[in-house]
Amino acid sequence: MTSEGLVVRNVKAAIEGKIVLRGVNLVVKPGEIHALMGPNGSGKSSLAYVIMGHPKYEILEGSIIVDGEDIASLPPEERAKKGVFLAFQTPPETMVKTRNLLIHISKIRGVPFSRALEAMKRVGLQQDLLDRYLNKGFSGGEMKRSEIVQLYLSSPKYPILDEPDSGMDIEGLLAIGSLVKELKQKGSGILVITHVARLFRDFSPDYVHVMIDGRIVLTGGHEIVKLVDEKGYEYIKTNYAPKEDTG
Ligand SMILES: Nc1ncnc2c1ncn2[C@@H]1O[C@H](COP(=O)(O)OP(=O)(O)OP(=O)(O)O)[C@@H](O)[C@H]1O
Ligand SMILES: [Mg+2]
């Protein structure tokens, strides 16, 4: 089906009156890995939140389309049902027992709970976390790992991973890499936000985008990762970003 994909079309968005996305275009097709890079504060997480439907963000213009259907007015849980999933850069503390959330996800996805235990083992998470409130008092790496467990269990069509590598040790990075490759093989279209070229030793993105000041100013293949690594974002900003940036 040609309408398959996650499409962000000319999206302008604001949070608390501040414009953070200034016309973003992005198409993620099933089976593709897209990397989104860009300096701190350029709007990467904002894009992830806008796609997922964070209520604080206001879409001023444009549309978000999943498999041909505009989801921009749907609440996050409805977007989740369409296959959109966000692994948070900074996972929020919750009042939900980890076990209950994982049971809930496995029921929705129709997979046995044993898969959650398997996933925890795979990412190196202690099972005593099951009986704690999700993310409450979790270490940075434990929070990121628990996002990966949810991702593994959900196996969504359009996962967005917001800096999954931050605070992760080598084993954690390897676990992310193998999961991303597996999801791609299963036909997911994946958006990975990262600063770290290291992550791409474990899997190779099909497309790499650089966001500056709320716009994707550069898109290419793996060579962009090298360009970012060698020249930095200032170079890309000077050479590729539009000069007037008041919009
Ligand atoms: N609640 C808010 N009120 C005002 N501004 C906000 C709010 N939330 C985010 N912003 C601003 O939006 C801009 C984009 O933030 P965003 O988190 O999307 O950046 P990012 O590209 O993900 O950065 P990083 O690499 O540091 O994660 C930043 O300038 C940030 O301060
Ligand atoms: Mg961010």
Image (cartoon, rainbow, N blue to C red):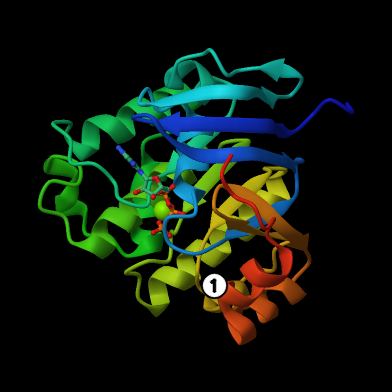
Task: Name the quadrant of the N terminus.
Answer: top right
Which amino acid type is shown beneath numbered disc 1?
Answer: Leu
Query: Which residue is found at the position 32% from the left and 35% from the top?
Result: 102
Q: Residues within 10 Å of mark 1 (few under 14, many from 20)?
A: many
Seen from this angle, which residue lies furthest bottom?
A: 230
Query: Which residue is found at the position 18% from the left and 31% from the top?
Result: 96
Query: Which residue is found at the position 33% from the left and 25% from the top?
Result: 104
Q: Residue at label 1?
A: 199
Does residue 107 appear left or right of residue 62 in this picture? left
Between 244 and 132, the one lying in front of the other is: 244
Up/down of 157 relative to 74, above or below: below
Seen from this angle, which residue lies furthest top?
A: 73
Task: Name the quadrant of the C terminus.
Answer: top right
Residue 166 pos. (x, y %): 37, 66
| Mark 1 CB within 8 Å of ligand 1 | no
Residue 129 pos. (x, y %): 17, 50
The answer to whether residue 206 is seen in the rendering is: no
Q: Secondary structure at mark 1?
A: helix
The answer to whether residue 74 is seen in the rendering is: yes
Residue 121 falls in image quadrant: bottom left
Residue 101 falls in image quadrant: top left
Does residue 128 appear left or right of residue 51 in this picture? left
Seen from this angle, which residue lies furthest right?
A: 2
Between 44 and 133, the one lying in front of the other is: 44
Up/down of 26 relative to 211, above or below: above
Residue 137 pos. (x, y %): 10, 52
Residue 70 pos. (x, y %): 67, 16
